Amino acid sequence: MSQNSARFIVIEGLEGAGKSSAVSLVRDFIEKYTGHAPLCTREPGGTPLAEKIRTLVKTTEPGDPLCDEAECLLIYAARAQLVANVIKPALARGQWVLGDRHNLSSLAYQGGGRGLMSLVETVSRATLGDFKPDLTLYLDIEPALGLRRAARRGELDRIEQQELAFFERARATYLAKAQEDDSIVVIDAGQDMAEVHKDILAMLQQRL
Ligand code: Z5A
C-alpha cells in the first residue's frame, strides 16, 4: 500500500444503532483488504487529554450543569487533539483510520439536537478546515428503537438521557447531511444484525 492511499473511515449513528459491532466488522474487513489493522479511534476521546474531556462531557457535575455551548466547545477541543496528534499522523504514515464517530456527530447532536448549527459550523471550520473522512457509514435507526436497545445495555449517560425529540432532530440532521454529501452512506440499522452487516460489507466492497 502506498503512503498516500490510507483512508479515514467513520461509523456514525444514534444510540443503539449497533456502532460497536459495525466497528469490529469494518476493522476486520480493512485488515483483510489492506493487510494491516487500521488505527481505531473513538470520539469524544482517543488521546489522553481527549479521554479526560470525554468524561467531562458524559457525566453530570452536581450544581454546575454543562451548558450546550460548553459541551460543543469541549467536544471540538477533544477532536482537535485527536486529529492533530493521532489521525493525521497515522494517515501520513500510510495507516488506515477507523473512527467510532467524528464531526458528523457534532452536526447531528450539537447542531441538530441542541440547535447550535451556526456555532458548530464556525468551530468545525476553524478546527478542521477541509479535513473530513473519505467514507462515513451512517447506521440509521428510529430513535425510540435505538434507545430501547441502549437501555438494555445498562445505565444511560448524560446525553443518552435527553428527550426523544432531541434524538429525532439529530436523526433528521444525519439524514439531511447524507443527502448533501456523497461520502456519507446510509445503512438501515433497524434490521437484524446479520442483515445490517451484510449491507455494510456490500457497501464496502462497492466503495473500496
Ligand atoms: N457525542 C456528541 O454529542 N457529539 C459529538 O460530536 C460526539 C459524540 C463525537 C458518546 O457516547 C456520546 O457523545 C454519545 C454522543 C455524544 N452519546 N449519546 N447519547 P458513547 O461513545 O459512549 O456512546 P455511543 O457512541 O452512543 O454508543 P455505543 O455504545 O458506542 O454504540 P451503539 O451504536 O449505541 O450501540 P451498540 O453497543 O453497538 O448496540 C447497543 C445494543 O443493541 C447492544 O446490546 C447490541 O447488541 C444491540 N444491537 C445492536 N445492533 C442490533 C441489531 N441490529 N438488532 C438487535 N440488537 C442490536
Image (cartoon, rainbow, N blue to C red):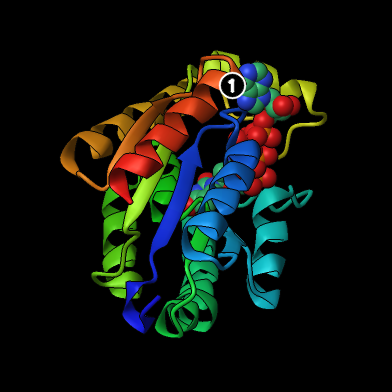
Q: Residue furthest left?
A: 180
Q: Quadrant of ligand 1?
A: top right
Task: Please provide percent x and percent y for residue 146.
Answer: 59, 21
Residue at position x 26%, y 48% in the image: 183
Task: Please provide percent x and percent y for residue 81.
Answer: 53, 77
Residue at position x 49%, y 74% in the image: 95
Q: Which residue type carries mark 1?
A: Ala
Residue at position x 42%, y 56% in the image: 9
Q: How many marks?
A: 1
Label 1 C-beta lies within 8 Å of the nearest ligand 1 atom = no
Along the viewing direction, whichever of 147 and 64 lies nearer the viewer: 147
Going by the image, does 102 lie left or right of 163?
left
Quarter of the image where one finds residue 121: bottom left
Task: Please provide percent x and percent y for residue 74.
Answer: 54, 64
Residue at position x 46%, y 20% in the image: 165
Going by the image, does 136 lie left or right of 11?
left
Residue 119 vs 191, above or below: the answer is below
Q: Residue furthest right?
A: 154
Q: Secondary structure at mark 1?
A: helix
Residue 208 in sight here: yes
Along the viewing direction, whichever of 192 and 31 lies nearer the viewer: 31
Residue 159 in sight here: no
The quadrant of the rendering that contains the N terminus is: bottom left
Residue under pointer 1: 194
Residue 119 vs 50, above or below: the answer is above
Residue 53 vs 106, above or below: the answer is below
Badge 1: how crowded within 10 Å, few (<14), some, or many (20+)?
Answer: few
